[in-house]
């Protein structure tokens, strides 16, 4: 598949960002209006939206915006400008920054042209929420998690270090064709109740073939933020504040970055193709569910094929209000994040846990569960020892402490939080072809759902480590006696 480079130049060839009214370079974002404000003449201006909806069905091959091209150092890494105010020569290293101030007169200079080395994205989504509002969101989030919060964290927590950051993403349109083949089951009848319950179902061969148009699928393009192992970091909470209204992105203008931090993209298109394909397959599987509602016991797709006929990649800076806290306990460090989508206000975070308190209360929850469970067991064994006896339900009393520990850990750490790309990304099915062929009737099945059903599976999740976390926490609870004694 050939790659086409799309020119996303802004047309400003001198590399400077100037006020269109007076020519000053002292221009910053007014978050209240979303426009650029000249700090000299007070005039406001805005940059044209550049991510308007295209006809995705016409995409053929791979189109890459000039800001999304491969990150290859070249002669333009070091750029020199002559300060228009005092005439001094100013150097900007685009590996480190995209703006600078004149060291003599403090005049502001910024790169406003596309630099084909990964330093400058194709588009920017300006901040919409002011810092005070973001601080309130983070404070509210933390205040709801005080009881099990680590005492050191509660003492040191302050929203003063909340900062606005532009994080790098790839925004991708995809013109694809999906083919899914497998089997599905429809529930016909339910027999009995309790442990004797069984199900009759009809088994079908099914196939779904359709064109799939995906609009603005958004993927992190920073190696650090792509690493979402919840056992060692909390990056997944940043992923969870998506989606952004990327259709409102404006053409690159470094003035939008004034007063905010930014992180440079360090992953190329080649490094994201596999992730893109997995997430588009997830979207296809999710859309196909709209056509199999007849199959009440689910579907098992044995073959899933995705043909990407065309794609369009653009590099973008998207706005996040970010709070960070480094927890250092017993020599182990964990950086906790609380993040706010600076466009929608969606908030997610991770709060350090007072494990000793959580383990103590989990122990008493477990103890209460065991006592109640044993009482239930004895009572029902005395009343009725028949086959339908629900006495074994008392064994549930062996699990509440474990469940409570995991539930609270996930509430404070939000390890399962993520961007639900499969349903939150705009997508359309076209030219749907369906095959549904009755195979046979199945009698007295024991499970209420089709064996091997995978129509709700999600494979393109970046976050990982959750299953290991369950085992790790269970092991900790098993050591509760020793920890409480210490």
Image (tube, rainbow, N blue to C red):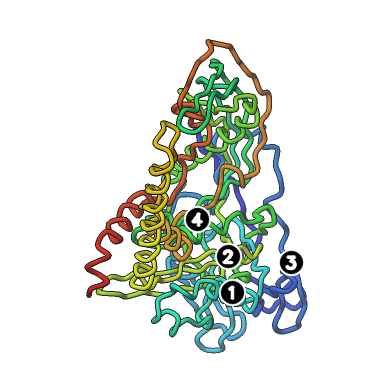
For mark 1, does the 10 Å Cα neighbourhood hold few (<14), some (14 to 19), or many (20 or more) residues?
few
Kindly identify which numbered label has been placed on residue 277.
Answer: none
Where residue 329 appears, x then y in whole percent? Answer: 30, 75
Is mark 1 in CB contact (under 8 Å) with mark 2?
yes
Judge from the rendering whether residue 396 lies leftward or rightward of residue 188; answer left or right: left
Q: How far apart are marks 1 and 2 (CA)?
A: 10 Å
4 or 1: tag closer to the N-terminus = 1
Instruction: Name the residue furthest bottom.
Output: 104
Q: How far apart are marks 4 and 3 (CA)?
A: 35 Å
Residue drawn 67% across the image and 51% down it: 51
Kindly identify which numbered label has been placed on residue 46.
Answer: 3
Identify the residue position indicated by label 1 in the image. 140
Residue drawn 39% across the image and 52% down it: 373
- Circle 4 SS class: loop
3 or 1: tag closer to the N-terminus = 3
Question: From the viewer's perspective, is residue 58 above or below residue 146?
Answer: above
Question: From the viewer's perspective, is residue 22 above or below residue 243?
Answer: below
Identify the residue position indicated by label 4 in the image. 417
4 or 2: tag closer to the N-terminus = 2
Kindly identify which numbered label has been placed on residue 347.
Answer: 2
- Circle 1 SS class: helix
């Amino acid at each position: 598949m050939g790659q086409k480079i799309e020119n996303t130049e802004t047309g400003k060839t001198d590399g400077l960002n100037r006020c269109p009214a007076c020519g000053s370079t002292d221009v910053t974002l007014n978050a209240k209006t979303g426009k650029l404000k000249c700090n000299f003449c007070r005039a406001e201006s805005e940059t044209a939206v550049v991510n308007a909806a295209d006809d995705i069905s016409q995409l053929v091959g791979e189109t890459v915006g000039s800001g999304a091209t491969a990150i290859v150092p070249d002669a333009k890494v070091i750029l020199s400008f002559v300060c228009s105010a005092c005439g001094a020569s100013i150097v900007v290293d685009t590996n480190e920054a995209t703006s600078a101030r004149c060291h003599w007169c403090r005049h502001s200079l910024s790169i406003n042209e596309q630099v084909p080395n990964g330093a400058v994205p194709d588009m920017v989504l300006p901040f919409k929420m002011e810092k005070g509002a973001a601080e309130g969101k983070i404070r509210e989030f933390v205040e709801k998690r005080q009881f099990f919060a680590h005492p050191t964290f509660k003492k040191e927590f302050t929203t003063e270090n909340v900062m606005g950051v532009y994080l790098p993403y790839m925004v991708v349109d995809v013109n694809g064709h999906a083919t899914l083949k497998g089997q599905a089951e429809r529930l016909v009848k339910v027999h009995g109740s309790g442990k004797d319950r069984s199900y009759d179902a009809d088994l079908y061969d099914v196939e779904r073939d359709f064109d799939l148009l995906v609009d603005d699928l958004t993927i992190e393009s920073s190696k650090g933020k792509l690493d979402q192992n919840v056992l060692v970091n909390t990056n997944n909470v940043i992923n969870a504040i998506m989606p952004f209204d990327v259709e409102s992105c404006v053409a690159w203008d470094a003035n939008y970055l004034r007063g905010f931090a930014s992180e440079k993209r360090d992953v190329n298109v080649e490094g994201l193709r596999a992730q893109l394909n997995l997430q588009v397959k997830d979207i296809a599987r999710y859309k196909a569910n709209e056509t199999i509602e007849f199959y009440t016991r689910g579907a098992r797709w044995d073959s899933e094929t995705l043909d990407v006929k065309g794609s369009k990649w653009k590099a973008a800076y998207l706005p996040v209000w970010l709070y960070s806290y480094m927890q250092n306990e017993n020599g182990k460090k964990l950086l906790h994040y609380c993040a706010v989508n600076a466009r929608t206000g969606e908030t997610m975070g991770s709060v350090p846990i007072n494990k000793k308190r959580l383990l103590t209360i989990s122990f008493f929850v477990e103890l209460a569960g065991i006592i109640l469970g044993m009482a239930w067991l004895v009572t029902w064994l005395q009343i009725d020892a028949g086959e339908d006896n629900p006495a074994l339900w008392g064994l549930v009393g062996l699990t509440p402490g474990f469940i409570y520990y995991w539930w609270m850990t996930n509430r404070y750490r939000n390890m399962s939080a993520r961007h639900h790309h499969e349903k939150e990304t705009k997508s359309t099915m076209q030219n749907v072809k369906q095959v549904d062929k009755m195979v046979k009737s199945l009698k007295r099945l024991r499970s209420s759902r089709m064996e091997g059903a995978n129509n709700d599976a999600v494979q393109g999740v970046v976050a990982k480590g959750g299953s290991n976390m369950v085992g790790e926490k269970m092991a900790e609870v098993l050591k509760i006696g020793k920890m409480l004694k210490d």
